[in-house]
Image: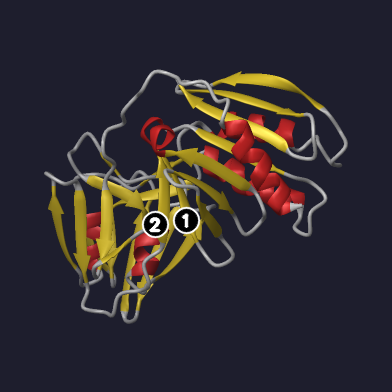
Amino acid sequence: MRKGILKWTVMIMMFVMCVPQVFALSEIRVRVNGTQVYFPDGKPYVDSNSRVLVPVRFVSEQLGAKVEWDAAAKRVTIIDGDKVAILNINSKQIMVNGQVKELDTAAIVKGTRTYVPIRFVSEALGATVKYDNKVRIVYIDNGKAPLPEVKVYTSGNFTIPVVEGTKVTDLGGAWNIETPTYASIWFDEEWAQKGNLLILVTPETTKPYSDQCDEIEALLAQDMSISDAKKIMDYARTKTVQHKILTEKVYKTSNYTVKVGSYNESVEIRVIHK
């Protein structure tokens, strides 16, 4: 069945219409001990105080630290051996091993992620930090052995990681990526510059359909609002069996036109940058 879906995907894309090209500014990247950090949804950014803020969990874990989140107190605790750093959301203070230090920018919650000023947090954990503004890369080093780097494919601001169970088919200037949940993601070189995607999710496979939909919802939320991503995938979730037809619906976000419909075993989600 999965080979049939791939063949169908390739045939569909032969008839895809071109859209005007849009280029995105280069995103900020973070490298810890030489290994690039993969951010599955929220991305690093520079705030109004010219400080780089990053989702705390992924960088901290790459440094070998443990992250604890207290939702009730709106407090994040980072533990690395005998070092403990505590930040309260919207506070310009960080407590390191019981000593309070002042920051010039506050930790915040953005979407579903907690963002922290990366320089202060990393240095509190004993790491050195350097930001190269020309190439927009943050280099962090704490002397530990680097963790394996996650290979990723990108289309515009969307990032698809190649983790265990992912299958990538190189079609010569185009790629079909089958995720561990059996969702299928297609784009070519031209689409990668624009941030376009053709996605297929298929119920009644050997993997839970809910897992496919949740995975694609998280992917869409990388470059559209969480509510828009949920609305799109909630319609896809209404197809519970392969023979059910979904009349095409069109969703417009601030950056994308998304068409969702199904006339065969899969739901097609076509994401086109405006």
- Front residue of 130 and 243: 243
Q: Residue at x 67, y 54 (%)?
A: 182
Disc marking residue 148: none
- Front residue of 118 and 132: 132
* Quadrant of the drawing holding the C terminus: top left
Give the labeled residue for mark 1.
161
- N-terminal of the two: label 2 or label 1? 2
Give the labeled residue for mark 2.
38
Q: Residue at x 61, y 49 (%)?
A: 215
Looking at the picture, which amino acid does disc 2 mark?
A: Tyr
Q: Are the two marked residues, 2 and 1, in contact with CB atoms closer than 8 angstroms?
A: yes
Mark 2 neighbour density, 10 Å: few (under 14) some (14–19) many (20 or more): many
Q: In the shown orientation, is residue 111 left or right of residue 134?
A: right
Protein image colouring: secondary structure
Q: Position of residue 115 (x, y in %)?
A: 37, 48
Q: Helix, strand, or loop for circle 1?
A: strand
Q: Helix, strand, or loop for circle 2?
A: loop
Kindly tell me whether residue 28 is visible in this rendering: yes
- Front residue of 114 and 88: 114
Q: Residue at x 24, y 68 (%)?
A: 34
Q: Position of residue 273 (x, y in %)?
A: 45, 25
